[in-house]
Image (cartoon, rainbow, N blue to C red):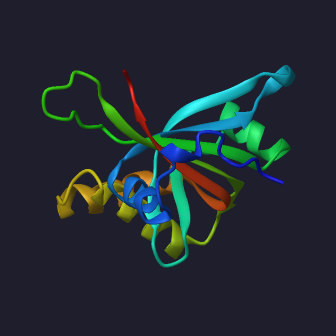
């Protein structure tokens, strides 16, 4: 059903893919948009090691939500900050592409867990976290992406 990676010599292991998902904070979520146009939007994510799913949060309405209600198939792409080999100018970047299905999370305890873990990727300030949960949770929609296919590769930008 899913294509094999064409440049298989650049493919990274599943473990390396998961490291990118765990350590990076952002990616781009691509959806089936309006009028046949794709719609891709930068998102913060949390990768849950317990179940292998990715979680997001955002507004309860808008283009993203309208698109998801029509088609739950998505693609999410994450890439790391890269590194340079000594003496070389080119950046080496690991990227991960995930195809899967996305759904809303409506259970309050799960929403709190998701928002807490998302926030902890950026700060360990408990006071800030508690204030955000208390003030913003009623306005937030949480999303769960269940991966169906994942590939990753190391690209040298030269």
Residue 145 lies in quadrant: bottom right
Estimate the x, y position of residue 88 in percent, counting from the top left. 20, 25
Q: Quadrant of the N terminus?
A: bottom right
Please give the name of the residue rendered at 53% of the width and 58% of the height, measured from the top-left corner: 55
Residue 61 lies in quadrant: top right
Task: Please give left or right for residue 39 compared with residue 53 in the image.
Answer: right
Does residue 26 show up? yes
Estimate the x, y position of residue 158 in percent, counting from the top left. 36, 21
- Residue closest to the eye, 74 or 63: 74
Up-down: is 44 above or below 33? below
Estimate the x, y position of residue 128 in percent, counting from the top left. 22, 55
Does residue 62 show up? no
Please give the name of the residue rendered at 86% of the width and 20% of the height, measured from the top-left corner: 35
Task: Please give left or right for residue 140 compared with residue 68 in the image.
Answer: left
- Residue closest to the eye, 10 or 78: 10
Please give the name of the residue rendered at 62% of the width and 30% of the height, measured from the top-left corner: 40
């Amino acid at each position: 059903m899913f294509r094999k990676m064409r440049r298989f010599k650049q493919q990274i292991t599943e473990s390396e893919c998961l490291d990118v998902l765990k350590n990076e904070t952002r990616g781009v979520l691509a959806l089936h948009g309006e009028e046949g146009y794709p719609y891709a939007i930068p998102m913060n994510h949390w990768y849950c090691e317990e179940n292998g799913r990715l979680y997001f949060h955002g507004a309860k309405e808008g283009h993203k939500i309208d698109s998801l209600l029509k088609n739950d198939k998505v693609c999410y792409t994450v890439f790391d900050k890269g590194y340079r080999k000594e003496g070389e100018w080119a950046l080496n970047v690991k990227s991960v592409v995930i195809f899967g299905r996305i759904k809303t999370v409506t259970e309050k305890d799960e929403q709190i867990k998701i928002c807490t873990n998302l926030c902890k990727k950026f700060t360990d300030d408990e006071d800030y976290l508690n204030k955000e949960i208390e003030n913003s949770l009623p306005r937030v929609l949480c999303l769960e992406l269940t991966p169906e296919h994942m590939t990753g590769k190391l690209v040298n930008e030269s």
